Amino acid sequence: MSHLSILPTVLRNAEVLAASLRSLGLTPLPSQALAGFAGESVQVDVALNLERDLWIGWRRESDGRLTLIGDLQRLSRHHRLQALLGQITRAYAAHQALVDAASQLPQANLHLSV
């Protein structure tokens, strides 16, 4: 019996998250409901299909953080999930640093090389 779990993250910017996912060759999808067990569903702001019917998503909380939503029981069988979440977090940090630098240095030409 699986269900959707909500895990806190340090991510705050959904647009930066989507750009980070794209930079990793992933396809972020806009707001949608992730389905869980027995008709349970959770609305997310950014969704990512990992394989066939295995999804994760991020939802904005009242404090501004994005929480990770997913079916942990099914996700635990996805062998590269931990590495993928690490890659997403690093890409997000790099993209957010560019956004922050651009706001401080509006005349600068900034880009991210991978």
Image (cartoon, rainbow, N blue to C red):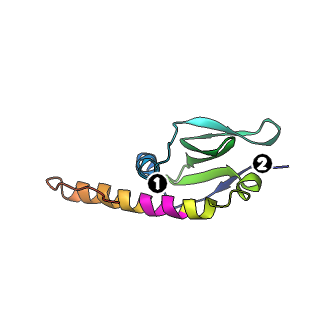
Residue for badge 1:
12
Whichever of callouts 2 and 1 sits on the residue coming sooner in the sequence is 2
Residue for badge 2:
3
User: Which residues are the magenta region?
Assistant: 86-92
Amino acid of disc 1: Arg
Left or right: residue 11 compared with residue 109: right
Secondary-structure class at tag 2:
loop
In the rendered image, residue 13, in percent from the top left (x then y), is placed at: 43, 51
Give whichever of 52, 15 is nearer the camera. Answer: 52
Contact flag, marks 2 and 1 (Cβ < 8 Å): no
Question: For the residue carrying disc 1, how many other residues have a C-alpha within 10 Å: few (<14), some (14-19), or many (20+)?
Answer: some
In the rendered image, residue 85, in percent from the top left (x then y), is placed at: 56, 60
**Does residue 14 lie above or below 8 as drawn?**
above
Which residue is at 66% across, 53% downward? 6
Which residue is at 80% across, 42% downward? 37
Question: For the residue carrying disc 2, how many other residues have a C-alpha within 10 Å: few (<14), some (14-19), or many (20+)?
Answer: some
Q: Quadrant of the C terminus?
A: bottom left
Determine the CA span between mark 2 and mark 1. Answer: 24 Å
